[in-house]
Image: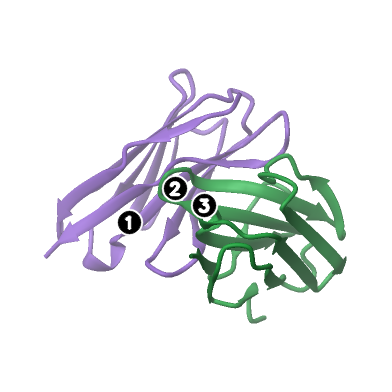
Chain colours: A purple, B green
Amino acid sequence: GEDVEQSLFLSVREGDSSVINCTYTDSSSTYLYWYKQEPGAGLQLLTYIFSNMDMKQDQRLTVLLNKKDKHLSLRIADTQTGDSAIYFCAESSGATNKLIFGTGTLLAVQP
Amino acid sequence: DAGVIQSPRHEVTEMGQEVTLRCKPISGHDYLFWYRQTMMRGLELLIYFNNNVPIDDSGMPEDRFSAKMPNASFSTLKIQPSEPRDSAVYFCASSPTPSGELFFGEGSRLTVL
């Protein structure tokens, strides 16, 4: 079945770059997504990438997709304390047309 | 638009009691989703509706859980009877498509004692 894996925790210093990694299993996924969850709030879409793209840049965010290895990453440049949150990757299942979320990565930004 | 609205934000109840969680989706969104978030299991899709009709309820844990969507602007998730293992944050989300951008509510934190 579909499965999306992420590392649980990442700690960086303010101003550094953060890289959050994700692996997925459904090779038929059309889109892959990154969501952000701040404390006490729901998830909010950050960015997404179409499966036929390798890279997408959106201001401080860079998404890299390695379709062969089924690996997705989110790079946040110049990480700020306001970036501290849980980040979820998600794939749209080709079989069920549902979003499958990863386990989430807690990003802690140290001042 | 005010976004997806959920109530209550917090609920503390005793084991065996009935719990009803409510959701108002964004107007015009045809898809509504109920998710449960726990530390152990992460984010789980419980059920989703399209045009008020339940499409996939395979994630509903057991018969104690039921969800309804009587109209396009309201949905409920009911747990009867509630158990301590049901303690979690329950999210409602809506979307114009089944697997595109989901718009989440702020969640209902349920504690069953």
Q: Which residue is mark 2?
A: A88
- Helix, strand or loop at disc 2? strand
In the picture, the disc for residue B85 is: 3
Letter of the chain that mark 3 sits on in the rendering:
B
Q: Position of residue A73 (x, y in %)?
A: 37, 38
Q: In the rendered view, does B62 fall on the left or right side of A77?
A: right
Query: Looking at the figure, which quarter contains the N terminus of chain B?
Result: bottom right
The image shows residue A36 at horizontal and vertical percentages of 43, 57
Q: Residue, x 22% and y 56% (percent of image)?
A: A108
Q: Nearer the viewer, residue A26 or B11?
A: B11
Q: Is residue B111 above or below residue A103?
A: below
x, y percent for residue A92: 63, 38
Q: Nearer the viewer, mark 2 or mark 1?
A: 2
State how far apart marks 2 and 3 are (Cα): 24 Å
Residue at point 72% right, 38% down?
A97
Residue at mark 2 to residue at mark 1: CA–CA distance: 17 Å
Query: Mark 1 to mark 3: distance in Å?
Result: 40 Å
Judging by the rendered image, the residue that carries numbered circle 1 is: A60
Res. A86 in view: yes
Q: Give, as a three-letter code, the residue at label 3.
A: Arg
Q: Is residue A16 visible?
A: no
Q: Are marks 2 and 1 on the same chain?
A: yes
> Which amino acid type is marked by label 1?
Arg
